[in-house]
């Protein structure tokens, strides 16, 4: 009997390890959805190994990044569907790298990605029969987000940039991103709220610190009108559903309140579960409500309001915006290069699907 069990263990298939590489610049819910789909393709127990290309490799093949190496690595590591993160991944997917990380297949969206010389980045994996693909998320991309920021930096007094978004949120997409769990009676519930626009490592570190205060983290994501009131007539850059999905993919988040009220009310503190702590980033100013009220008045009166220190408090959405503004000409050239490259990639994709490539 013992020998039989040992043999069963030896012959039991090992979980598939999946290689998913990319630039992951301005890591957004489209990236997260790609990783989610890759993990689902791998079946039960699949391990997602996310290879993150270096700044230098991306510059040579695509153009300058907005977020730096360490920031992109941290953003990918915070995605709840990622199991392993690998730095300095080659821009052209390498079978040797896949083998080095024991990955049987690589997975990518149903669009062709090319190197600087026009070669298909996934050709080696395709030739080896170790390539799988999924449908990419429509309506969002790093190029699209950079375009929105360039538009905002050129016209500071415009309607909210998020209004230009073509992304359509569905109940099924939100359900796919949701953890689908409720707090337990014994859980210590922490509540935070904010815009979470252009979800970045500053947000991630704050959420990580907030989650450490308790067992169950609820994040309130403000609607576009509230964000517009708090920041300027041109914000937010991403609409409320885009921002909700960006927050939901983060491994430190248990639940999200969509279009949460600016003021932390009794309903917020008691409807989902009894909130024990309301947290806000330390040394970070916040706007009063449209009626001139302190949004944290009630939790302060209850003695449950805390300010949380975290290591990247200097990183804000404005920090990301400032990088675009300071290097506007550079990013405009990047966008033009990307548009030209995209046309070539689209034609290669058409040929591949038609069987003529």
Image: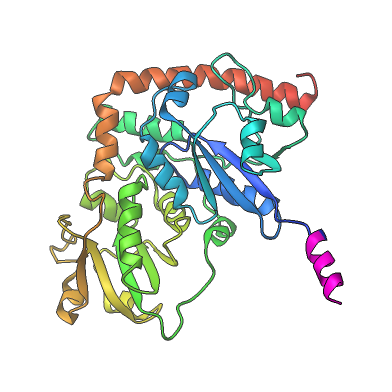
Q: What residue appears at the point 41 percent right and 21 percent down from the top-left corner?
A: 334
Q: What residue appears at the point 36 percent right and 79 percent down from the top-left corner?
A: 188
Residue 264 visible here: no
> Which is nearer the eye, 48 or 288?
48
Q: Is residue 163 magenta?
A: no
Check the image and report above or below for 145 versus 332. below
Q: Is residue 34 left or right of residue 220?
A: right
Residue extending furthest toward the left = 292
Q: Position of residue 60 (x, y in %)?
A: 46, 19
Q: Is residue 321 left or right of residue 102?
A: left
Q: What residue appears at the point 66 percent right and 20 percent down from the top-left corner?
A: 347
Q: Is residue 3 magenta?
A: yes
* Residues shaded magenta: 1-10
> Which is nearer the eye, 203 or 127?
127
Query: The N terminus is located in which quarter?
Result: bottom right
Image quadrant in which you'd find residue 5 = bottom right
Q: What residue appears at the point 24 percent right and 26 percent down from the top-left corner?
A: 326
Residue extending furthest toward the top = 117
Residue 94 visible here: yes
> Which is nearer the eye, 108 or 172?
108
Residue extending furthest toward the front = 3
């Amino acid at each position: 009997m013992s020998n039989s069990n040992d043999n069963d263990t030896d012959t039991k298939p090992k979980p598939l390890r999946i290689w998913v590489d990319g630039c992951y610049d301005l890591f957004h819910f489209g990236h997260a959805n790609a990783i989610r789909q890759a993990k689902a393709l791998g079946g039960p127990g699949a391990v997602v190994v996310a290879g993150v290309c270096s700044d230098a490799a991306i510059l040579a093949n695509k153009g300058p990044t907005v977020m730096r190496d360490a920031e992109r690595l941290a953003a990918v590591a915070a995605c709840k569907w990622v199991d392993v993160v690998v730095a300095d991944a080659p821009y052209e997917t390498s079978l040797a790298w896949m083998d080095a990380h024991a990955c049987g297949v690589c997975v990518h969206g149903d669009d062709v990605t090319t190197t600087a010389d026009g070669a298909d980045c996934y050709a080696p994996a395709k030739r080896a029969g170790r390539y799988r693909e999924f449908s990419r998320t429509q309506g969002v991309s790093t190029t699209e987000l950079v375009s929105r920021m360039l538009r905002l930096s050129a016209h500071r007094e415009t309607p909210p940039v998020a209004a230009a978004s073509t992304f359509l949120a569905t109940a099924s997409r939100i359900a796919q991103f949701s953890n689908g769990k409720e707090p337990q009676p014994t859980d210590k519930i922490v509540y935070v709220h904010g815009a979470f626009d252009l979800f970045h490592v500053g947000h991630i570190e704050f959420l990580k610190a907030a989650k450490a205060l308790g067992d169950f983290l609820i994040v309130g994501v403000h609607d576009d009108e509230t964000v517009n009131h708090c920041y300027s007539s041109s914000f937010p850059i991403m609409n409320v559903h885009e921002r909700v999905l960006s927050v939901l993919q983060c491994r430190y988040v248990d639940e999200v309140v969509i279009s949460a009220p600016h003021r932390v009310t009794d309903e917020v503190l008691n409807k989902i579960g009894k909130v024990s702590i309301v947290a806000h980033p330390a040394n970070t100013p916040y706007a009063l409500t449209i009626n001139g009220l302190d949004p944290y008045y009630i939790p302060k009166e209850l003695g449950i309001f805390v300010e949380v220190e975290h290591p990247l408090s200097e990183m804000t959405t404005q920090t990301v915006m400032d990088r675009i503004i300071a290097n506007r000409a550079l990013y405009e050239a990047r966008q033009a290069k990307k548009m030209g490259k995209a046309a070539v990639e689209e034609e290669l994709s058409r040929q591949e699907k038609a069987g003529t490539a």
